[in-house]
Amino acid sequence: MWEQFITDMQGRALSLDALRSSHPIQVPIAKAEEVEQVFDAISYCKGGSVVRMVHAILGEAKFVEGLRNYMSNFSYGNATTDDLWGAWEDVSGKPIRKLMGQWTRQMGFPLLELKAAEPQPDGSIKLSLHQSWFLSDGSAPSSSQSWTIPLFVTASGGANGEEKMDEAPLMPAEADFELNVKGDGAWFKLNAGQHVPMRVVYPETMVPNLASAVRTKSICAADRIGLLSDYAALARAGRVDPASYLELLAAYSAETDGTVWSMVLEQLGALRGILNDDETLSELFSRFARSMLLPKLAEIGWSPLETDEHLTRKLRGELISILSSFCANEPEVQAEARRRFDAFVADPSCSELPSEYQQAVYKLVLAGGGEAEFETLLRLFDTLALNEEKKSTLMGLGAAPTPELRTRALEFAISGKVKLQDFFYVSLSMHRASAAGKAQTWEFFKQNMSRYTAMTDKATSSILDAIIIGAISGFATEAKAAEVRDFFGANPLPRNERTITQQIEAIDASAKYLQRVQASTAKEWLESYLQK
């Protein structure tokens, strides 16, 4: 369960909170209109992450005792955030008020850097640690921020291949920190268990050993997820070499855990989005991705088994979903998708097209087809009863292979035949499907913004937020960032201002990342890897 939380909830929090346009968990509300913008993924996902951090610091018993006291003391009355922190502090004797104030009243989160690991006469290893404010674009922070950080550490060595600390010391916010740990010095995994919403960077010489620990499963699934997530973000920020990140990513080829694979697939998809604007790099990376994906597909297969666990079924769906991005032209993939699609169209009650990858098969078949397949999806939208099935057809329409069909799909979404809360699925899917789809979705939004705003005028701002994200997320050039900025400068949407600012900042960061990848040895690394 916690591995999924780390991938989904904590990952979402770290992605948004690394932007300059982020905000603290606790934010003063000056006017009612600000409420919808403030109660977003940062409030909920980061909020949940810091509560999980407290649970790890206190342990189960003290966490529950403090929570019970808080609920008893303030039942049927008013309470503040500090009252909860105080309840935990009272039962534990730990400085929870001070610690949590730093994590909830400051925006952002720390980058913890392992500067050095020095053997000591008593056989321990002294770790020298430094923290700084992490920003996703790699720019220097505009102010000095720091956090009290609980240090959970695991290291290579010991009877079971690793050493773990009995208790997490607190690294003070005001200074660098030194910590003695046991281990043989080959590798250290800081933020063990991923209990703290932060990033961690290691000396470059240690990364190959960490990659080896990934291959041998010497670190737990949660830490394998966290390590990959950290290095994806660090590469994007220019803190590590893109080729080194690719080397680490390749270490996950033999991964067996479904939740870890979910993170692998997420990062493959994210990097594909960045490299779409460079044809050579995009093709090389797609071949690299296929070298990881196709063996895994052969291992778990298309057909569900009675013995499958929930996570296996979930992984199968995610794996086949990403095939539409990397393997749409693979003859075997296309043939199997077509076979299952035809069987489902003939008899929607058949078992050939499980719900977990229904959407992916629609995308594969439409991307490799044309108008006939497009019309079939429209008929399915009309005839399928369940709303989830209808949403899958909308996402499938986003894979339309020609400009004419893409226009028809976007027009259909706002024709009134699709529920208001669902019509953004077409543009979101189309924007992610291809570079051509990305460009056309944005052009359609610019030409039809008045129609979108009229449709969503009385709805929650999150509906138009989703349309905006579907129109502009994923661009990776400075020119496109300027174009988006200029458009919304001339056509402001006050209710959606925070989302627009976040997306423009993300485009700027993506543009810098693409430039770093192009200037690095990533192309040579991919060519060398693919020759093995």
Image (cartoon, rainbow, N blue to C red):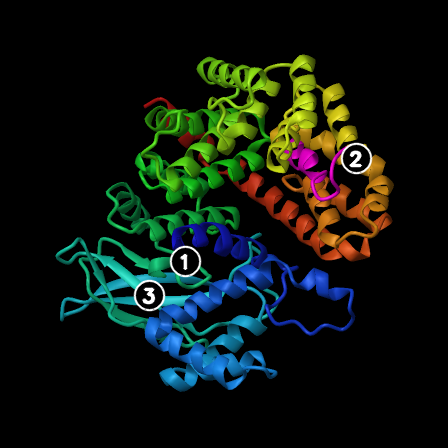
The residue indicated by pointer 2 is 414
Q: Residue at x 27, y 60 (%)?
A: 154
Disc 1 and disc 2 in contact, CB within 8 angstroms = no
**As drawn, 227 above or below 436:** below
List x then y, in percent, for residue 200.
Answer: 41, 58
To which quarter of the image does residue 208 belong?
top left
Q: Which residues are magenta?
A: 417-431
Disc 3 and disc 1 in contact, CB within 8 angstroms = no
**Of the pair 1 and 499, the residue shown nearer to us:** 1
The residue indicated by pointer 1 is 200
**Of the pair 496 and 396, the residue shown nearer to us:** 396
Disc 3 and disc 2 in contact, CB within 8 angstroms = no
Please state if 47 lies on the left or on the right of 169 as rendered.
right
The residue indicated by pointer 3 is 152
Circle 3: residue type: Phe
Marks 3 and 2: which is nearer the front? 2
Asked if the magenta segment contains residue 532, the reply would be no
Q: Residue at x 50, y 16 (%)?
A: 334
Circle 1: residue type: Val
**Of the pair 447 and 339, the residue shown nearer to us:** 339
Q: Does the rendering let one see residue 97?
A: no
**As drawn, 300 above or below 208:** above
Q: Residue at x 44, y 74 (%)?
A: 148
Q: Provide the secondary structure element on which disc 2 rests.
A: loop
Give the mark nearest the N terminus, 3 or 1. 3
